[in-house]
Amino acid sequence: LQNPRAKVRDYARSQITTAQVDGRAVRTERFRYIRWRAKGGEVAEEFYDHRKDPGELRNLVKGGGEERALAAHRRLVPA
C-alpha cells in the first residue's frame, strides 16, 4: 500500500453456502444486512441496526423505519 491509512471501502462482505441455502451479508459500521436464498429459490432477509440492537434481536426488514439504509445495503449484496 502506498498509503496504509487510506480507506478502501466502508463495508465488509461475507458468504456462506450449504446444501440447502446460500447466504450473503454486508456489514457496515452501523448495520448488517443478510440475504438468504434457499435452493428452491425462496428468499429471506435480515437487517439489523448495531447501534440500537447489537445483539441482532430486531429484524428491521419489515417496517423498521430504516428503509433508505435497507435499500442501500441491498445494493451492496450481489444477487
Image (cartoon, grey):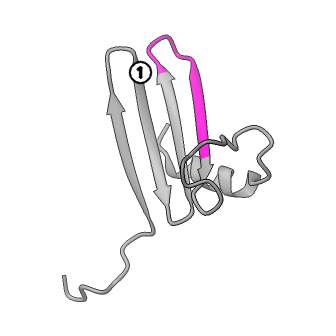
Q: Residue at x 52, y 40 (%)?
A: 34
Magenta highlight on residue 45: yes
33 or 50: which is nearer to us? 50
69 or 31: which is nearer to us? 31
Q: Position of residue 52 (x, y in %)?
A: 65, 59
Q: Which residue is mark 1?
A: 21
Q: Is residue 35 left or right of residue 6?
A: right
Q: What count of labels does the image hold? A: 1
Q: Residue at x 43, y 32 (%)?
A: 23
Query: Measured along the vertical axis of the image, is residue 1 above or below residue 22?
Result: below
Question: Within the image, what quadrant is residue 62 found in?
Answer: top right
43 or 63: which is nearer to us? 63
Label 1: which secondary element: strand
Circle 1 Cα neighbour tier, 10 Å, few/some/many (<14 / 14–19 / ≥20): some
Q: Is residue 31 left or right of residue 60?
A: left
Magenta stretch: dominant secondary structure? strand
Q: Position of residue 42 (x, y in %)?
A: 57, 17
**Magenta-drawn segment:** 38-47
Q: Quadrant of the N terminus?
A: bottom left
Q: Position of residue 67 (x, y in %)?
A: 75, 51
Residue at the top extreme, as displayed: 40
Q: Residue at x 49, y 10 (%)?
A: 40
